[in-house]
Amino acid sequence: MSAGRSARRIAAIGARLGLAAAALMMTAPLALAVPSAPDWAFPPLGVKPPSGPARTITVPGSRVQRPEAALHSMVAAVDWFPTAHPAPPSLVLKGEGKAWACGYCHLPDGQGRPENAALAGLPKAYILTQLRAFADGVRRSPQTRDGASSGAAALMIQEAQAAPQGEWDALAAYFSRRPFVSRVKVVETDVIPSVKPQVYIYVAQQGPSAPLGERLIEIPVSTEDFEARDPHASFIAYVPKGAVAAGARLADSGGPAGQPCQACHGAGLKGALGPPLAGRSPSYILRQLLAFRAGTRANPEAAPMRVVAANLTNVQMIDLAAYAATLRP
């Protein structure tokens, strides 16, 4: 399907949803306010791990060895498995001007990490639309610090504005062709290990367990693999008991907007008009639902999702994100 035809179909769905939302707002109390995005969904920068003695490191299965300091350069991405993918556009591995290396955050094969998007397998047109939204400042975090978009979204705004637009097409084409591999396990529980924020994600730490409550907390199985930027690092997402089944029912019914998720995201949420969601980071999906509800994903293409998310509660968003993450891409 062409990008133009997809846009027209999305616009038609948006129009129908818009009418539904308008009717809903006419019958809703005028004092109804949009719930705020919970702080726990946006781990802060936290405390970076202290630097130890200079050493050379590698990751399991790789023949590449690099000085540990190379892991901390945003202008040069470490590619542990260079033969596992085609040669990428130069900006994936090396920064240009004020633009950082795309592979530093999203990894050279586009698998991404919970604090940012997995670009692998996303439609090329969708990636280009998001680059434009970031560059125009109409895709922001729903949580602000000092009046500005915070966290990884703030970094992406800077990146999109700095990355040469003449290279966007090649970047989007490269990442869209990379196969996405899900490496997250969803665990329903009442209690989670002790965790701390570390560079926009939670990691395990020594300490007593804690009640999960109405939260979604995603952590790397191995903090060491995560810090090494190993694309094979795996994650555990802790969600409340019953969240997956509740999310499945909500996705099927369409929730308050009456629009089943598969209408746009396809059977098994593997992608259709909307991007694929199956098996992707649930904490990332949750943050996007919060942004749609808050209106900080404000580009025109996001209008249908803003209507869908407008009346979802935080718990419902957790349920949907948990369910989507359990599906196989």
Image (tube, helix red, strand yellow):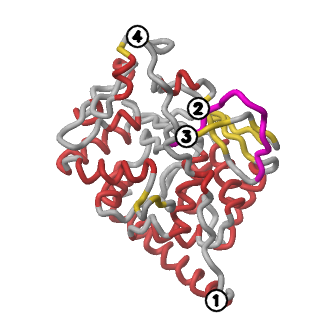
As helix, strand or loop, the secondary structure at mark 4 comes to loop
Q: Amino acid at mark 4?
A: Arg
Vertical arrangement, residue 232 with respect to residue 173, above or below: above
Q: Are marks 1 and 3 in contact (CB under 8 Å)?
A: no
Q: Are marks 4 and 1 in contact (CB under 8 Å)?
A: no
As helix, strand or loop, the secondary structure at mark 3 comes to loop
According to the picture, the residue beneath numbered tag 3 turns out to be 201
Instruction: Give the alpha-carbon distance from disc 1 to disc 3, as whole Å.
Output: 37 Å
Vertical arrangement, residue 305 with respect to residue 238, above or below: below
Q: Which mark is residue 183?
A: 2
According to the picture, the residue beneath numbered tag 4 turns out to be 55
Q: Are marks 2 and 4 in contact (CB under 8 Å)?
A: no
Instruction: Give the alpha-carbon distance from disc 2 to disc 3, as whole Å.
Output: 16 Å
Query: Which mark's residue is nearer the viewer, 4 or 1?
Result: 4
- Is 234 on the left-hand or right-hand side of 121? right
Query: Which mark's residue is nearer the viewer, 1 or 3?
Result: 3
According to the picture, the residue beneath numbered tag 1 turns out to be 30
Q: Amino acid at mark 2?
A: Arg
Instruction: Give the alpha-carbon distance from disc 2 to disc 4, as whole Å.
Output: 28 Å
Highlighted range, magenta: 200-213
